[in-house]
């Protein structure tokens, strides 16, 4: 894997908590936008760390924005004091990076929860994601976010606008340029820890796609939990249903 960068973190819960989770955001976002998961896990007795991925938020900038580079960074991210994560939650790009990291190191995490993961992207997926991110960078204001997502919580509106202001547009563009064959299905088939998927009910890049069928070849992947009506970011579109699904998954 490429040389990893050290990623900045935000944390929820006490360091003395017995269970530790890592939260990995999607393309064009930041760790702060994983706050719904952080709050829910802290309330359930976990300690959760969310990272800013390379080129995003306060993370270091680089030239390499391959999926392997993103994976190297998260694979090098360990709980305070070392050891394995009890849980890694990865959204979209964060899901792809987490799959690669888990496939390479079975001791990195004990389980994965993937939120509408970008395991393999079709050309129309890439076009849609690119158009959305272009619009976000062209008008990185709360007004624009609120107009596009009037049902989002005000904190998500604030944080999404901020993410577009503090994330490198070049890094986001290079993430698509440097990964012309965006497909980590082979790695997904090698993951040796339990994997649960929370999928979007509308416009999903995972559900009802060839990759959903393909990863079913790994018995560690359980059938996806679908958040009806929610888009690619279910934790913002329907946070109550998404967090309820997560807590049910975790038992």
Image (cartoon, helix red, strand yellow):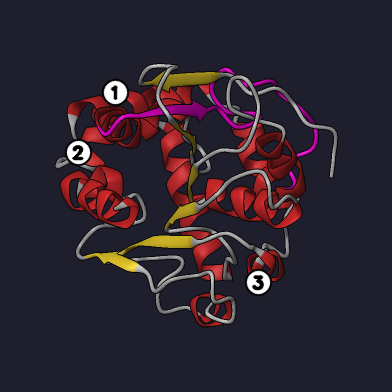
**Displayed quadrant of residue 47:** top left
Question: Above or below — where is 52 with respect to 129?
Answer: above
Q: Main secondary structure of the magenta part?
A: loop
Give the CA distance from mark 1 to mark 3.
Answer: 37 Å
Residue 171 at x, y = what percent?
A: 66, 34
CA gap between label 3 and label 2 equals 35 Å
| Camera-side mark, 3 or 2 | 3
Q: Which residue is mark 3?
A: 189
Range drawn in magenta: 44-66
> Label 2: few (<14), some or many (≥20) within 10 Å?
some
Query: Is-magenta flag for residue 77?
Result: no
Q: Which residue is mark 1?
A: 158
**On the rendered structure, is 162 left or right of 174?**
left
Tell me which residue sits at (85%, 40%) in the image.
2
Marker disc for residue 152: 2
Q: Assign a secondary structure to mark 3.
A: helix
Is 236 located above or below residue 79 in the figure? below
Q: Identify the residue at image location x=43%, y=48%.
A: 132
User: What is the x, y in percent for residue 64?
Assistant: 79, 38
Picture residue at 52% right of the left edge, 79% below the top: 216
Disc 1 is placed on an element classified as helix
């Amino acid at each position: 894997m490429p040389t990893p960068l050290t990623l900045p973190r935000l944390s929820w819960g006490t360091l003395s908590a017995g269970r530790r989770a890592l939260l990995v955001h999607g393309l064009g976002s930041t760790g702060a936008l994983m706050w719904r998961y952080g709050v829910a896990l802290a309330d359930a007795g976990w300690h959760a760390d969310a990272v800013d991925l390379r080129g995003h938020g306060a993370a270091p900038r680089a030239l390499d924005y391959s999926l392997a580079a993103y994976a190297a960074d998260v694979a090098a991210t360990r709980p305070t004091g070392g050891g394995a994560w009890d849980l890694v939650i990865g959204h979209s790009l964060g899901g792809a990076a987490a799959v690669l990291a888990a496939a390479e190191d079975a001791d990195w995490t004990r389980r994965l929860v993937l939120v509408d993961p970008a395991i393999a992207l079709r050309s129309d997926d890439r076009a849609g994601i690119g158009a959305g991110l272009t619009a976000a960078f062209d008008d990185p204001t709360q007004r624009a976010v609120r107009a596009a997502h009037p049902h989002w919580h005000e904190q998500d509106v604030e944080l999404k606008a901020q993410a577009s202001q503090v994330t490198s547009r070049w890094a986001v563009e290079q993430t698509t340029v440097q990964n012309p064959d965006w497909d980590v299905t082979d790695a997904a088939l090698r993951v040796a820890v339990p994997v649960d998927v929370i999928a979007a009910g509308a416009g999903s890049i995972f559900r009802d796609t060839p990759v959903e069928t393909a990863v079913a070849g790994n018995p560690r992947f359980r059938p996806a939990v679908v958040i009806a009506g929610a888009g690619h970011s279910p934790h913002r579109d329907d946070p109550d249903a998404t967090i309820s699904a997560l807590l049910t998954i975790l038992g």
